[in-house]
Image: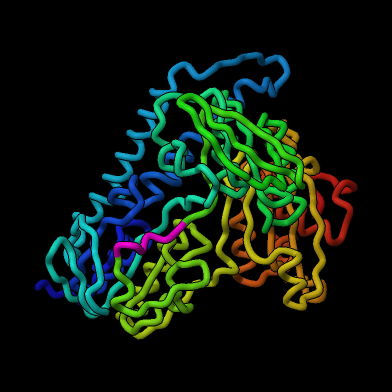
Amino acid sequence: MEEYEYAIIGQGAAAFAAALKADEFGIKTVMIGKNETNGTLLGGTCVNVGCVPSKRLITAGNFLDKINKDRFDGLYYSTRVENFGKIMEDKEFLVGSMRFSKYQKVLGKLKNVKYINEFASFIDKNTLEVNGKEIKAKRILIATGARARIPEINGIEKIKYLTNEEALSMKKLPKSMVIIGGRALGLEFAEMFSHFGVKVTLLQRSDKILPNWEPEVSYYLEQYLRDEGVNIITNAKIDRVLGSKEMVDVYFSVKGRKQEVKAEKILLATGRTPNIEKLNLTATGIKLNESGFIKIDKYMKTSVDGIYAAGDVTGEPMLEALAAAEGNKATVNAFGREKLSVDLNSVPSAVFTFPEAARVGLTDKEANNKGIRCACQPVMFKDLAKAGIIKDTRGLIKMVINANTKQILGVEIVGENAADLIHEAVLAVKFKLTIDDIIDTVHVFPTLSEIMKLGALSFYHNVEDLSCCSE
């Protein structure tokens, strides 16, 4: 039997952040890597089958789209996908190099951490079985992540479907694709493949895409995606699927009216399920939440003393940076005197469509449900000088503030580089800044980041009546 102070089950963002902190503390640690996500290697979902490869392909698709748009008068050019296999090889090279430099190389420098590329299963709350051997640890962190959830659709088990993993490893572009799911992953893949020339139909169960976002953001982003060529059908209830060697038939209904769509490929973007099957959690008594993910308190503690959990295995929100923060803080809480938590209200999220969408804090509806009297209104990118300069005026900002104190409670942006622009809003929400604090801050002109200042100014003025250099 091997004995350690700390056992980390997982090899993604949460696990690595925990290992780095444990090594810093000088704690004898073992990291046990494997989980049920098939495409996940050292580094976890994000670097292997998530953020890194998908954003590389999205960037390539956006570049292709920009070239073909003839945005500027007097410049006319066009191009097309010449070799999709080469694009995928380039993506694989990026993934491999990042896996080596950011994970394998980093792991090799940790003096107090041993890595085992195997599955772990609980024997009891302090003992794990790993490849037939027992490992004992005083503290254990579960960071096994999550994988694509396969919905219960009549006929789904008889067809060859794609999840994010298979979609990111295709060597040949299909001519057509049906995507089920209208949240971040579904929208990103829909537009990416559309930019590559694939005829994409997206089926969304609710009456709008991004159903938990501000209605204005959902509405405008949907219109932009339609303009980009994505066929979006909302209120779609999937009845059954039927497949042949070349095509997939998807039968669905919209408000009772039966419809059908055919495509070469079907991609499921219908949420995530936790990687817990091989852990034998019943041996510990760890409780799960109503969605089947590991239940934790604000300090990342599970229902069992000495066992912590972090990252996607604990459920929404599933974000790489949040997973890392949780893994770090869980380790501090397990071995230090401090008790650290993550303020989820100030954690941003983004959708990497083109234009992008990003958010932080409360929506108008969420603030009202908390009994806070809100003031909020959208400001369009067309009122921003830089948007006119780059000739892309799509987008808006919606800022939610406390009507009495002017404190900024939440911000949502859809527009060029929204995922970068949101960070000023993150600081505003985190440190309880007011719209006056933003207005009093000098912003570089001309920049897209001035949209935050325009959003703040809109509570005092009609921004259409302002010059570029107001206040």
293 relative to 337 in the view: left or right: right
**Residue at point 36%, 36% (across, down):** 94
**Residue 34 or 139: which is nearer the viewer?**
34
Q: Determine the residue positioned at 15% across, 61% down.
A: 131
Is residue 384 in sight in this rendering?
yes
Q: In percent of the image, x 82 and y 66: which residue is there?
A: 375
Q: Nearer the viewer, residue 166 or 351?
A: 166
Q: Is 251 displayed left or right of 12 in the figure?
A: right
* Residue 408 position within the rendered picture, expressed as x and y whole percent measured from the top left: 71, 67
Q: Is residue 337 above or below residue 157?
A: below
Residue 448: say if magenta: no
Question: Which colouring convention does the figure follow?
Answer: rainbow
Work out whether residue 155 or residue 367 is closer to the camera in this orientation and state it: 155
Span of residues in magenta: 273-278
Quadrant hosting residue 110: bottom left
Residue 398 point in image, percent of width and height: 75, 56
Tag count: 0
What x and y, as percent, mark residue 352?
57, 44
Relative height, residue 87 to residue 337 (above, below)? above
Q: Is residue 198 above or below residue 398?
A: above
The C terminus - image quarter: bottom right
Left or right of residue 410, residue 216 in this image = right
The single residue placed furthest to the left in the displayed view is 1
Where residue 460 appears, x then y in whole percent?
86, 61
At a point 60% along the width and 26% down the height, the residue shown is 199
State whether residue 438 is above or below residue 205.
below
Where's the N terminus, which quadrant?
A: bottom left
Whether residue 63 appears in this view of the structure is: no
